[in-house]
Amino acid sequence: MPVRYAALFLAVALAGCATPQYQTRVQFIPPADAAGRACVQGCEKTRSACQADCGARYQACVQGVDAEVEARYAEALARYETELRQYAAALRQYEMQLRFEWLHAYPHRRPYGWGMWPPLPPSYREPQPPTREGVRAQRVKETCHDDCNCQPAFDACFVGCGGQRITETFCIKHCPPAK
């Protein structure tokens, strides 16, 4: 009976720990006059040019990364071989330790039960071999950026033309009670 109450208390306590999640929505209201709408079209052209330029720079960066992928892949393979050797040595040491413990344990005091070995500790996990695609993706992530901040400049231009930018943030999950 007390275990049931403890589980109920734990569930209620954890439910109270959930943090609210919010979403932000941006709404653009164009200017009412024709001159303002023409100005906004200029802002849109500038944003499109910024995005096209940013895309071209990103593609050039990706092509530059392609040139160095082989060298980085060779380095990753060398690291993998070193980690694999360390893993094999640690595994051999672990197996020897288990054998000696098993031999010295009496039948009524077997440390791991009859015929059962303990699982390998997390530090003994086998390393995974690298792939060219993984090395390339990591390098692209580190060096190439496809966000050139075109949107903030557009927002400022849009407001400067007489438009309105309305930002609305609302709770979508684990919302606090309304007051």
Image (cartoon, rainbow, N blue to C red):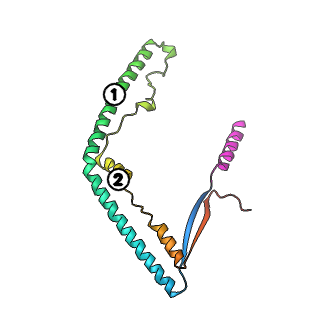
Front-lying residue, 116 or 83: 83
Residue 88, numbered circle: 1
For the record, the magenta segment spans 1-19
Q: Residue furthest right?
A: 179
According to the image, label 2 marks what residue? 140
Q: Is residue 75 left or right of residue 173?
A: left
Q: Is residue 26 left or right of residue 127?
A: right
Q: Which sits in the foreground, 97 or 80?
A: 80
User: What type of secondary structure mainly makes up the magenta span?
Assistant: helix
Picture residue at 49% right of the left edge, 74% below the top: 157
Q: Given this view, does label 1 or label 2 mark the residue nearer the observer?
A: 2
Residue drawn where x is 53% and y is 86% of the image: 33
176 left or right, relative to 162: right
Q: Amino acid at mark 2?
A: Val
Residue sticking out furthest to the front: 160
Residue at image x 62%, y 52%?
19
Residue 79's label in the rendered image is: none
Q: Tell me where residue 3 appears, x and y as whole percent.
A: 69, 37
Q: Earlier in the sequence, mark 1 or mark 2?
A: 1
In the displayed structure, would residue 153 be above or below residue 80? below
Tell me the SS state at disc 1: helix
